[in-house]
């Protein structure tokens, strides 16, 4: 595994799968196979090694070791591991990358520690408005929802938009009517409430009030108070890439504000020719750069490798003044996780199937 700066590049040669069309001799089975898998490969010349891969994030920002208790850190790590486990289980069984990214994001939406689904941040009106999107690298099909208020798992609705509507993006009441018509669970806004996010809203409101009145009081507002997002990118055994992203957006955002998360090409992108990408950070900047598509375009049109393309796109965001990070995986299973903040909740699966979770730089 190659580690360069904030980027990790890796090749996933995780396991052996039966493939009737395969012609690779069993002796060429990958070195990282377990003894049992090697034995099976030797006994079956029609088996070949397939690459699969999964990367997730739970938001980038100012994440200080000093302000994190061991209990809290353990809870974040456990949440990320659960999400990785849910997605990887699907890939291991030969499932679709689309199913894997949806499953991983769903776990993070259900976890109140992350700013997506339950635990979403509040708007200036004290409401929760969520954005999500998903993209299939094989067909370039995509689905997205913006500013939904009563959808327990916005990523599930985004997938439904992709698969059951003629559109790419639905928002607000229209998205929720579509959800209802398709049997998706609508929940009361209370479901999304967490005291921590409410306190963050009050802190941000107070800071802005005092800044406006110039009374000299200062407030420490961390990125943790302001935003966060969850996302996943995956490669399945058939070489299909997929990306999914979901968020509550930014604390104290104007009602109706939609960030980069549901904007295909900004917060999410997947193309089997190149890579799958999910972004997190100051959404307005990622939209202006078209960051997720930029990574793919740099690979497709300029021939850059994944790691360089990912860093170049993120640098463009930074040049405008935006902070954040992204996760990406290419068609060969290489991964990149650059970020320009001092931390990003993130995780990936090693070639031997080990789940790796990291938070700090
Ligand atoms: N990108 C998200 C948004 O702007 C927030 C984040 O990822 O922190 O809505």
Image (tube, grey):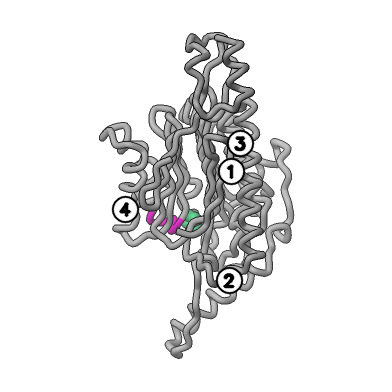
Mark 4 neighbour class, 10 Å CA radius: few under 14, some 14 to 19, many 20 or more: many
Assess whether residue 283 is covered by the magenta stretch.
Answer: yes
Distance from disc 2 to disc 4, alpha carbons, whole Å, reads 29 Å
Residue 345 vs 219, above or below: the answer is above
The residue that mark 2 highlights is 201
Kindly identify which numbered label has been placed on residue 355: 1
Towards the viewer: 222 or 158? 222
| Relative vertical location of residue 31 with respect to residue 124 in this rendering, above or below | above
Mark 1 is surrounded, within 10 Å at the Cα level, by few (under 14), some (14 to 19) or many (20 or more) other residues, namely some
Q: Between marks 2 and 3, how big is the CA–CA gap?
A: 35 Å
Residue ID for mark 3: 88
> Mark 3 or mark 1, which has the lower sequence index?
3
At x 50%, y 70%, the residue is: 222
Residue at mark 4: 315
Of the image marks 2 and 4, the number of the one nearer the N terminus: 2
Mark-to-mark CA distance, 4 and 1: 28 Å
Pair 4/1: label in front:
1
Q: Quadrant of the N terminus?
A: top left
């Amino acid at each position: 595994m190659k580690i360069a700066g904030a980027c990790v590049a890796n090749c996933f040669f995780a396991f052996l799968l039966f493939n009737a069309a395969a012609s690779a001799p069993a002796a060429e089975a990958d070195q990282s196979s377990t003894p049992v898998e090697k034995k099976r490969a030797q006994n079956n010349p029609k088996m070949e090694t397939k690459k699969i891969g999964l990367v997730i994030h739970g938001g980038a920002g100012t994440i200080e070791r000093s302000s994190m208790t061991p209990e809290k850190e353990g809870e974040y790590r456990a949440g990320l591991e659960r999400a990785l486990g849910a997605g990887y289980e699907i890939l291991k069984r030969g499932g679709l990358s689309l199913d894997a990214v949806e499953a991983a994001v769903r776990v993070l939406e259900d976890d109140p520690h992350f700013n997506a689904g339950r635990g979403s941040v509040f708007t200036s009106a004290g409401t929760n408005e969520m954005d999500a999107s998903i993209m299939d690298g094989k067909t370039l099909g995509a689905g997205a929802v913006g500013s939904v208020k009563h959808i327990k798992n916005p990523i599930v609705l985004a997938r439904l938009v992709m698969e059951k509507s003629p559109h790419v993006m639905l928002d607000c009441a229209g998205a929720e009517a579509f959800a209802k018509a398709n049997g998706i669970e609508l929940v009361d806004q209370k479901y999304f409430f967490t005291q921590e996010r409410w306190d963050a809203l009050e802190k941000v409101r107070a800071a802005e009030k005092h800044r406006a009145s110039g009374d000299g009081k200062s407030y420490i507002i961390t990125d943790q108070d302001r935003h966060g997002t969850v996302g996943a990118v995956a490669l399945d055994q058939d070489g299909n890439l997929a990306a999914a992203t979901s968020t509550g957006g930014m604390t104290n955002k104007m009602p109706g504000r939609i960030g980069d998360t549901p904007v295909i090409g900004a917060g999410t992108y997947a193309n089997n020719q190149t890579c799958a990408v999910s972004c997190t950070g100051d959404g307005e900047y990622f939209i202006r750069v078209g960051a997720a598509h930029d990574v793919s375009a740099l690979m497709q049109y300029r021939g850059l490798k994944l790691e360089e393309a990912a860093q170049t796109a993120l640098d463009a965001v930074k040049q405008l003044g935006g902070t954040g990070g992204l996760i990406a995986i290419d068609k060969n299973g290489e991964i990149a996780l650059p970020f320009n903040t001092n931390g990003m909740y993130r995780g990936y699966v090693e070639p031997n199937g080990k789940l790796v979770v990291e938070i700090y730089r």
